[in-house]
Amino acid sequence: MLLFDEPYANLDVPFRRALREDARQIIRQTDSIGLLVTHDPDEVLTVADHVVVLDNGGIVDVGAPQGLFDAPRSTYGAELFGEPQVFDATMHDQVITTAVGDWDRSTLIDPTISSDALKLVVDADHLLIDPDPQGLLIDEIRAVGRLDRLYLKSREGDAITFLDCLRVEGRTLSAGMRVRVTPITGKVFASPASIG
């Protein structure tokens, strides 16, 4: 058994990537077991076959890395991978109301959740931004790597909410546009707001 405790934490990114892959290949070729302790979600997704996610000393998620990325079982797990966008929300019947609009219950990973006040987590890759003359006003837009950070105002022009979304080739967003924000069906993690 090989034990790794934050082995790549102080390495530059290209060297870290190469060493991760080398270690993974050595473990496979020698039919060994590797136990990796890390705070880096990229390491989890690229190196691990099985993951145990700890929060405050307790196990909150267990499974294959891609499975935990696609369908987390805890708020902490949902916020761990990707580019999480976090929203407070309220739910009435089939409608979830957020600062960026109303969403259908079908957007939830677990649509059976029964709580009025929710904390929602959705990856930036799973947010759709479409022109909508009745939608939120883009006050400012900034490129952040492969993402766009949108600063949005409601129709009434009150408080600004910001979110990150995937930059899509062929789609042009600019300040002054009105847009609708909708998550992909089945991609939003929800927990009762009191749990956090």
Image (cartoon, rainbow, N blue to C red):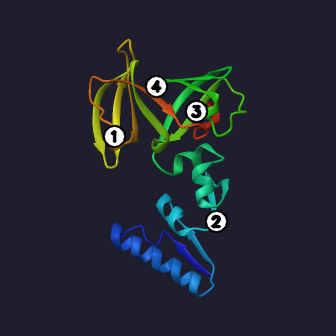
Q: Are marks 1 and 4 in contact (CB under 8 Å)?
A: no
Q: Which residue is mark 1?
A: 148
Label 4, label 3: how far apart the Cα atoms are: 14 Å
Residue type marked 4: Val
**Disc 1 versus disc 4: distance between alpha carbons?**
16 Å
Q: Are marks 1 and 3 in contact (CB under 8 Å)?
A: no
Residue 40 seen anywhere in this rendered image of the structure: no
- Where is residue 117? Give x, y as percent: 63, 25
Disc 1 or 2, which lies upstream in sequence? Answer: 2
Q: Quadrant of the N terminus?
A: bottom right
Residue drawn 36% across the image and 42% down it: 168
Determine the image quadrant of residue 109: top right
Real-space Cα distance between discs 4 and 2? Answer: 35 Å
Element carrying mark 2: loop
Name the element at disc 1: strand
Question: In 3D space, how far apart are the residues under numbered discs 3 and 2 (Cα atoms)?
Answer: 27 Å
- Nearest the viewer among 180 and 50 is 180
Residue holding disc 3: 119
Residue 181 seen: yes
Where does the image place residue 123, in percent across and percent down from the top left? 49, 43
Q: Circle 4 sits on which residue?
A: 100
Verify CB contact (< 8 Å) between mark 1 and mark 2.
no
